[in-house]
Each structure stands twice: as structure tokens, then as C-alpha cells.
Image (cartoon, helix red, strand yellow):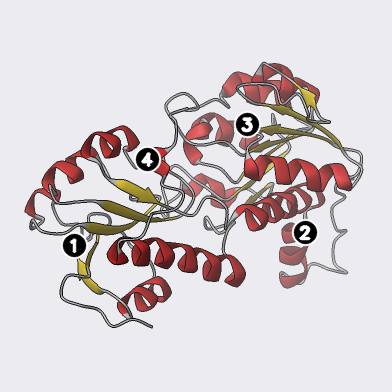
Amino acid sequence: MSQASGSDRILVIGAIGQDLREAFAEEFILIDHIIEGPQAKSISTIAEGFKVVLTRALCGASEELMQAMPDLELIVSLGAGLEKIDLEAARRHGVKVVHTPDELTEDVADYAVGLTYDAVRGISAADRFVRAEKWGKTPAPFTRRVSSKKIGIIGLGKIGSRIAEKFFGLGLDVSYHDRIEKIESPYRYFPNVRELAASVDVLILSVAGTASTRHIVDAEVLDMLGPEGYLINVARASVVDEAALLDRLEDGRLAGAGLDVFAEEPGLDKRFFQLDNVVLTPHAASFTKEARKALIATLLKGARAYFSGAAIENDAAARKPG
């Protein structure tokens, strides 16, 4: 453990969690200037002189922030997502970006599989049935078989590939959509999202939340998935037209869903609470002790490298755009 010097200051701008804070506080001087949430402070009031900021994926780092911090040289971001970090601005300003793109892959993929089984087999609904003391008083509802379902995945990146591998290993039929076809992939490729939705029973979202993917699952895609179909989202809420999804879950035009992300978090639409055909979880797909330990280690490694003058590994801003 190194002793923090007066120059080892980090400006904390995102709600990072107590465990990450404590780990960083052992080695660095942390100064809070949180720019998200009900107690958010203005970016324009940030004092100059900070060279490192600590944020999280859902808070990010905008060009406005970089302009307000002319001495900024490193962004350390908790999470895999980069959509709220302006990488083009980081390149222009010469700012490096450290995040955790690999540490969450296995856990998010596991979660997608788990949400699928829960949504299709009604495991959480069965738990509620027992807790409500309905067992023995009224018949438990029948559900559907998972092993006969066709799985479709939007986004065959690191997480999407692991989701596909897990289902394929279980003997299920797997198809996917991505910007380009993965020639080496054993799964069927659909260049069109609507065609994919029409061909599968379960549509799983594992794609970054960008301008090009906003509402990639719209009303038409949901209608192609149909009344026997299920939607699983462990990606970003922006990739789904949430209003259209709610309408179809309410009136039976979609069989069910498993959702870990929502348009408003944590204040999601109250209509979800009235539905028994949707599994709701608190953006927790990556929440394992193993993943948390790994991502803290990765972020600490990046900060240590910067303050010691060593090379920054896996600088996201240095990667080729696209």
C-alpha cells in the first residue's frame, strides 16, 4: 500500500460506492464534487488543478467537464459502458480513459441466462405465489419450457458472445444481429433486427446504448417478437421503446420480459409494478463480489500507473473509433 502525497489528488464526480471509495482513499486523496443525483454540483464550479477524475459509467465525463478541467489527464470510470464519456473530446484534450470492459462479462452473461429462465419459467412469480400463501388454495400457473425456445441476441460483443455460448452449450438454437456478421460464429446471422425478432422466442439485448441503437427495439420489433415472445434486457434502457414495451406487456401482445435496466433509475415507471409477467431487477447484472473485486483492482492499477509515470494499459481513448 502506497502513501498518498499531496499531488496524488483525485476528483470524484460520480456516485462510486463505499468499497471503491475506501480502496482509493487508502492510496490517494479524494475530493468530492459529485455532478449527478439530487445533490449534484455544477461542473462550472470545479476548481482547476485536478489531473484525475473518478466517475462511473452512468455518470460519465462530458466535454464540458474536460473544458472546465484544463489540467485533466486521466478519467477513471467504474463500469464497462463508455457511451456517457465523450471519447472524441478526450482525444482532442489528450485525456486517457481507464474503465472495466472485461471484468463484468461473465456475470452479466450469467444474469442474462438467469433472467431468461426466470421470465419464461416464472420462478419469481412462483416464489410470490408461495409467499402469498396461495399454495394448496389455488392451482399454480403453468409456464413454458425453456429448452425448446429459440434465442436471439442483439449485439455479439464480449457479453453477447458469452450469452450465446452459454445457451448454445445448453443445446438451444441461437441466432444474432450485429453491425457485421461474425464469419467464424456458429450461430445464424440476421442483418435485420425485425427479421431476427420474428424468428426467435426470446430476444436478448447486449448492445451499447448509443445514438445508433436508441429504440432499436421499437413497437414493430416487439410486434414481430409477438405474444409468445420474451424480451431480456441487460444492456441499456435506451435501446428499447419502453412505452411500447409496457403497452404490450399489459395487453398480452408480448408474453413477458426480464429487465435489469429502465428509462428512469431508480424511479422506474410504476406500471411495471402491476405486471406479473415481467421480472424486475435493480441494474444488478454485474453485482457479484468477484466482479467488484476485479474492477476495483483494474481501476486502482490504472490510477497507480498514472501517478507513478508508468504507461496506461487499455486506454479507451486510444482505441480506433468504431
**Quarter of the figure that contains the N terminus:** bottom left
Residue 235: image quadrant is top right
Tell me, yes or no, whether the two marked residues, 1 and 2, touch with CB atoms within 8 Å. Answer: no
Residue name at image x 51 percent, y 35 percent: 242
According to the picture, the residue beneath numbered tag 4 turns out to be 317
Q: Quadrant of residue 131?
A: bottom right
> Which dot, 1 or 4, sits closer to the camera?
4
156 vs 226: above or below: below
Residue plotted at (33% across, 81% down): 2
Q: Give the percent coordinates (x, y) of residue 250.
A: 62, 37
Drawn side of residue 131 relative to residue 319, left or right: right
Callout 2 crowding tier (Cα within 10 Å): few <14, some 14–19, many ≥20: some
Q: Earlier in the sequence, mark 1 or mark 3?
A: 1
Q: Do the residues labelled 1 and 3 touch (CB within 8 Å)?
A: no
Residue 165: quarter of image? top right
Measured in 3D between alpha carbons, the distance from the residue under mark 1 to the one under mark 4, in whole angstroms, is 23 Å
Amino acid bearing label 4 = Ala
Which residue sits at x=80%, y=22%? 199
Residue 172, position in %: x, y? 88, 40
Reading the chain from its start, which is encountered first: label 1 or label 2?
1
Q: Which of marks 1 and 3 is in front?
A: 1
Residue that numbered label 2 is attached to: 123
> Alpha carbon of mark 1 to alpha carbon of mark 3: how far?
42 Å
> Dot 3 corresponds to which residue?
248
Mark 1 lies on a secondary structure that is loop
The x and y percentages for residue 236 are 51, 41
Instruction: Identify the amino acid type marked 1.
Output: His
Q: Which mark is residue 33?
A: 1
What is the distance, in whole Å, between disc 3 and disc 4 at their CAs? 40 Å
Real-space Cα separation, disc 2 to disc 3, in angstroms: 21 Å
